[in-house]
Image (cartoon, rainbow, N blue to C red):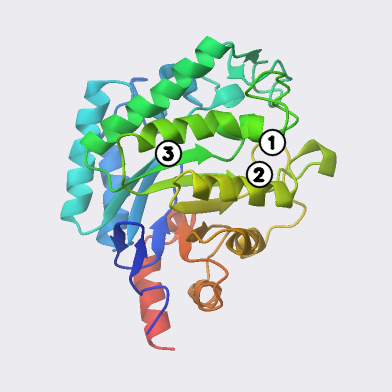
């Protein structure tokens, strides 16, 4: 029996296999309104037809100012929610579970002439504008936007909600000791930098008992004193478990305009393994996992519990079918 194609249970969510379509922005919104269109139905429907166990929709902005570009999806109004329900119903009819990743781009919001960040810091790169620092009232407004978007997603019928706490977006920026230089309750020591997402989780848990995930970037490819240490990420993961998170989705990078020196198949797996040592939660991992036998090995050796796939589908739309055939014939 293949581990990759075995069933999995994550909190109340039952998955028919352990292949997860990772949230990957398509930049396919055509009218700048954040609304799904036929391109999205085709894109996600193709993965459902191929029988991935779970489709997690791309990062969806909780407010207009939280988009990376005007081509991003949004979930701040009823029209967006209505189309989301149509997509969720469609994907359910094809036999797959559906999640949505909610996020705010923070200082990486190219759609804004003046993006926002926890503190007054430099622009992400020369292609971005310098952000301004959020005040307390704005922090509360954005937290409320996350909560309202979660309510809309639940009403649309999604099977899980993932908070985008990785890749240099706003939640990740609050975690950072370099980007978050605040001296109030949302900055300072690690507990203060964690508070922004903690309060979002607490408010969502007031009305939602279903599967709630968080995505984390565990390495910013920066100097040690310019990023959280792995032990600090393990502490954050333990706080997330305590506060009601059901699964951690592990990746790296995105906070700074820096790349790893070497990229190879499975290079992010050791980060997932480190999180498994810290918490009793399912761990989903990504990182150029192209070889189905490698995916199988990662699961068999308990280095992770779910396999996140994204770019592989751009080059091989039949990856799931071929992986199943290969593993069952081994």
Task: Give the mark nearest the N terminus, 2 or 1.
Answer: 1
| Secondary element type, mark 3 | loop
Q: Is residue 62 in view from this perspective?
A: no
Q: In which quadrant will I find the N terminus?
A: bottom left
Marks 2 and 1, how far apart at CA = 19 Å
Q: Is residue 96 in view from this perspective?
A: yes
Image quarter of residue 116: top right
Task: Give the mark nearest the N terminus, 2 or 3.
Answer: 3
* Residue marked by disc 1: 190
Say above or below: 99 vs 312: above
Q: Nearer the viewer, residue 85 or 242?
A: 242
Q: Is residue 315 left or right of residue 225?
A: left
Q: Which mark is residue 278?
A: none
Q: Residue 54's x, y, as percent?
A: 34, 56
User: Which residue is located at x 36 percent, y 57 percent?
Assistant: 11
Q: Residue 223's x, y, as percent?
A: 83, 42
* Residue marked by disc 2: 253
* Residue marked by disc 3: 26
Which residue appears farthest toward the bottom when viewing the image? 330
Q: Residue 221's x, y, as percent?
A: 75, 45
Q: Nearer the viewer, residue 246 or 119?
A: 246
Marks 3 and 1, how far apart at CA = 33 Å
| Secondary element type, mark 2 | loop
User: Which residue is located at x 58 percent, y 49 percent?
Assistant: 237
Task: Give the mark nearest the N terminus, 3 or 1.
Answer: 3
| Secondary element type, mark 1 | helix
Q: Nearer the viewer, residue 242 or 150?
A: 242
Which of pointers 2 and 3 indicates the residue nearer the eye?
Answer: 2
Which of pointers 3 and 1 indicates the residue nearer the eye?
Answer: 1
User: Which residue is located at x 30 percent, y 49 percent?
Assistant: 98
């Amino acid at each position: 029996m293949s581990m990759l194609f075995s069933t999995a249970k994550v909190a109340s969510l039952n998955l028919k296999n352990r292949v997860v379509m990772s949230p990957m922005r398509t930049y396919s919104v055509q009218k700048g309104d954040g609304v799904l269109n036929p391109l999205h139905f085709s894109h996600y429907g193709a993965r459902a037809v191929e029988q991935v166990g779970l489709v997690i929709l791309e990062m969806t902005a909780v407010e207009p100012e939280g988009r990376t570009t005007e081509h991003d999806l949004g979930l701040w109004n009823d029209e967006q929610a209505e189309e989301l329900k149509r997509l969720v119903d469609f994907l359910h009819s094809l036999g797959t579970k559906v999640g949505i990743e909610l996020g705010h781009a923070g200082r990486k919001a190219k759609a804004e002439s003046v993006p926002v960040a926890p503190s007054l810091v430099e622009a992400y790169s020369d292609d971005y504008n310098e952000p301004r620092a959020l005040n307390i009232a704005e922090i509360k407004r954005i937290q409320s936007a996350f909560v309202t978007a979660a309510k809309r997603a639940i009403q649309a019928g999604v099977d899980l909600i993932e908070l985008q706490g990785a890749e240099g977006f706003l939640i990740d920026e609050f975690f950072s000791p370099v980007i978050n230089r605040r001296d109030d309750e949302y900055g300072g020591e690690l507990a203060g930098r964690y508070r922004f997402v903690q309060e979002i989780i607490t408010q969502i848990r007031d009305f939602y008992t279903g599967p709630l995930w968080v995505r984390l970037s565990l390495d910013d490819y920066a100097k040690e004193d310019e990023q959280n240490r792995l032990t600090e990420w393990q502490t954050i993961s333990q706080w997330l478990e305590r506060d009601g998170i059901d699964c951690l989705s592990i990746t790296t990078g995105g906070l700074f305009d820096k790349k790893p020196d070497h990229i190879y198949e499975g290079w992010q797996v050791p980060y997932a393994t480190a999180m498994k040592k810290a918490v009793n939660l399912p761990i989903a991992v990504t990182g150029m996992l192209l070889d189905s036998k490698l995916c199988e090995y990662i699961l068999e050796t308990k280095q992770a519990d779910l396999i996140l796939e994204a770019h592989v589908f751009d080059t091989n739309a039949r990856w799931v079918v071929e992986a199943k055939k290969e593993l069952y014939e081994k």
